[in-house]
Image (tube, rainbow, N blue to C red):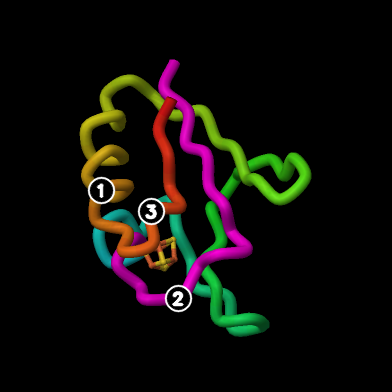
Amino acid sequence: MPTIIYYRNKCIGCGICFEMQPELWRLSKKDGKVTLLWSVAKKDLFILPVNKDLEQQCREVANACPVKIIKIS
Ligand code: SF4
């Protein structure tokens, strides 16, 4: 199962991820960073397994992030 790994601390809040994939990402009004919905926090990482059929879309989002803090494993 593909997994999204997100380094939230380094998010600059550009909005690309939630524009491309609004079902998984939300902009936090608290700190201006994006939250990966339903993810589990592990130290400074947020981790979310996704269905195989979402993998390609997730890879496109990861590639579009300007600071490259979204990884797919
Ligand atoms: S694309 Fe990257 S930097 Fe931009 S809001 Fe999403 S996670 Fe943050």
Compare marks 3 and 1 and give the one earlier in the sequence. Answer: 1
Real-space CA distance between mark 3 and mark 2, rounded to the nearest whole angstrom: 13 Å
Tags 1 and 2 in contact by the CB under 8 Å rule?
no
Mark 3 — residue? 68
For label 1, the crowd category at 10 Å Cα-Cα, with few meaning under 14, some 14 to 19 and many 20 or more, is some
Residue 4 shown in magenta: yes
Residue 26 or 15: which is nearer the viewer?
15
Q: Quadrant of the N terminus?
A: top left
Q: Secondary structure at mark 1?
A: helix
**Percent x, y for residue 40?**
69, 40
Ligand 1 near label 3 (Cβ, under 8 Å)?
A: yes
For the record, the magenta segment spans 1-17
Label 3 vs label 2, nearer the camera: 3
* Secondary structure state at the residue bearing disc 2: loop
> Does the magenta segment cover residue 18?
no
Q: Residue furthest right?
A: 43
Within 8 Å: ligand 1 and the Cβ of disc 2? yes
- Residue type beneath disc 2: Gly
Q: Which residue is mark 1?
A: 63
Relative placement, left or right, of 70 versus 32 is left
Mark on residue 13? 2
Q: Residue at 51%, 28% (x, y): give it.
A: 49
Distance, label 1 to label 2, CA atoms, is: 16 Å
**Place of residue 27 in the rendered image (x, y in percent of width and height, measured from the top left):** 49, 73
Q: Which label was assigned to residue 71?
A: none
Camera-side residue of 51 and 13: 13
